[in-house]
Image: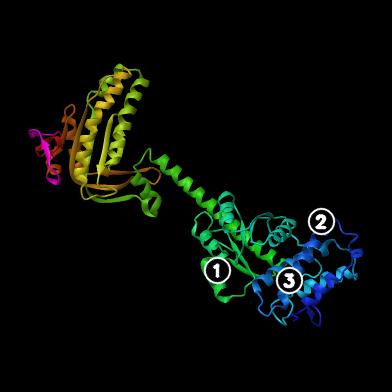
Amino acid sequence: MEVKVGIDNPGEFSLTRAIGSLEAIDEAALTDLDAEALEDWQSLLACAAQLRPLLSSEERDTHELRNLAGALRGYAEMLLEVVDAPGESLTLALEEVIRGTEDPTSTTLPASSGTNTQGSSLSMRGEPGFILAVDDREENRELLARYLTRSGHFVVTAPGGTEALEMLANADVDVVLLDRMMPGMDGHEVLQHIKADERWRATPVIMISGEQDMQGIIDCIEAGADDYLFKPFNPVLLQARIAAGIERKRWHDREQLYRDQLERNERFIRATFGRYLSDDIVTDILERPEGLELGGDLREVTIMMSDIRGFTTLSEQLPPDRVVSMLNRYLGAMTDIILEYGGTIDEFLGDAILAVFGAPRRHDDDPDRAARCALAMQQAMADINAANREDDLPEVAMGIALNTGTVIAGNIGSERRSKYGFVGHAMNVTSRIEDVARRGEILLAESTRHALRASYRFGEARSLQARGIDETLTVHPLEAEAL
């Protein structure tokens, strides 16, 4: 049985007849071939020998037929590159093979306008790439590697799906050429693994198959295949598809690099400004365009003020570097605790700390967060003083005031210089309470005690008439949270 195929000029050629023409070539026509070309010739004859019985079989394996026809065509094109004998029997036989393998599974098909009957020497299109070719047949892998290497690409091959995934895990591949029909893990399964892995998802995958199975094509496209070619493939078309895949991969890599740079820049901004502002304020500025606008709104917050008792006297008795060392240790420990409980540090005033719970981020339990934070801060003083003793620095004690009330919270200042801050009567009240807090004491205003949800132990309440405030203030020493 003969299989008819289309050609580039009028008439029809039979693949069986093309194989016969190859087998009729005598050794004299091969005398000018070098060792590599002779190896290609032997591979060509081996493919032809395997292909002949398939052509005469009543039940043809179209996948195997296309595989062998593709290999036959590839070796013929390779040989045409080195055979310089126009019109001679070897050249004519090789050209007949190329025409005959236009489509070995159809009886009469028009020839592809892209068929290269003068050899497969391809010019580079676009950038060279790192190509992974996956095929269970050795001759197919060899031909793909030779085609693409001659075009300037770097090519690695894998005989199966498992090996292909191992290579992807160890190399940055630009394009994968993937045979769909393979024993064990077939191409569709390999494709699913590639597209399911975040590391490889953007890598273009071109499926190559000898089966024109529409459902199989649809399954591969739905699984994420970027393109689909049938064997025997046209090398010029393959090169064009690879060039397009490399360009897509390059665009993706550039976009990923840009995203990585943006993330690094944002981390740098957060780390830098986070030393001067709370994380919530930095987030508000970076994520909301209006975050830098001047203005504010009324917020119900719990205000914390603390400082080291007698610090001015201590600082006068120590060298400046020792003062800074002692102060940084204290402020570093207090900062970590305040941020842990969700407080916003408004500013450091020497040894004093001003923090707010409830702005810019609000929690339903802000007064309790402030109370627990103050207790943790006083407990941390033991460790700070232990470290001070080791460094021959004086021990220190801290007073803390908590007050709950309404303030204006927002960006305060001018267009050239502003800060996220708080203003209002409640701020002044907190400052006056902090003035009278004793060493190691936490004083709560009446408003904060009433706002607490959890149970706490308190010392004896006392009243005070604060400077600049008309009303008498009642304050409560906080001792511990009740268990």
Instruction: Report whether residue 475 is seen.
Output: no
Compared with 391, 138 (above or below) is below
Residue 378 vs residue 248: left or right?
left
Residue 19 vs residue 284: left or right?
right
Q: Position of residue 63 (x, y in %)?
A: 64, 71
| Foreground pick, 471 / 142 | 142
Viewer-nearest of discs 2 and 1:
2
Give the residue drawn at x 61%, y 69%: 228
| Mark 2 vs mark 1, CA separation in Å | 37 Å
Residue annotated with mark 2? 36
Q: Position of residue 8 (x, y in %)?
A: 79, 77
Residue 368 vs residue 41: left or right?
left
Q: Secondary structure at mark 3?
A: helix
Q: Amino acid at mark 3?
A: Leu
Q: Amino acid at mark 1?
A: Cys
| Mark 2 vs mark 3, CA separation in Å | 23 Å
Q: Secondary structure at mark 1?
A: helix
Residue 460: in magenta span = yes
**Are dots 3 and 1 in contact, CB under 8 Å?**
no
Q: Compare marks 2 and 1 and give the one earlier in the sequence.
A: 2
* Residue 51: mark: 3
Give the residue drawn at x 81%, y 56%: 36
Viewer-nearest of discs 3 and 1:
3
Residue annotated with mark 1? 220
Q: Amino acid at mark 2?
A: Glu
* Quadrant of res 86: bottom right
Q: Which residues are magenta?
A: 450-466
Compared with 150, 49 (above or below) is below
Q: Position of residue 471 (x, y in %)?
A: 10, 39
Identity of the residue furthest to the right in this view: 28
* Quadrant of res 437: top left
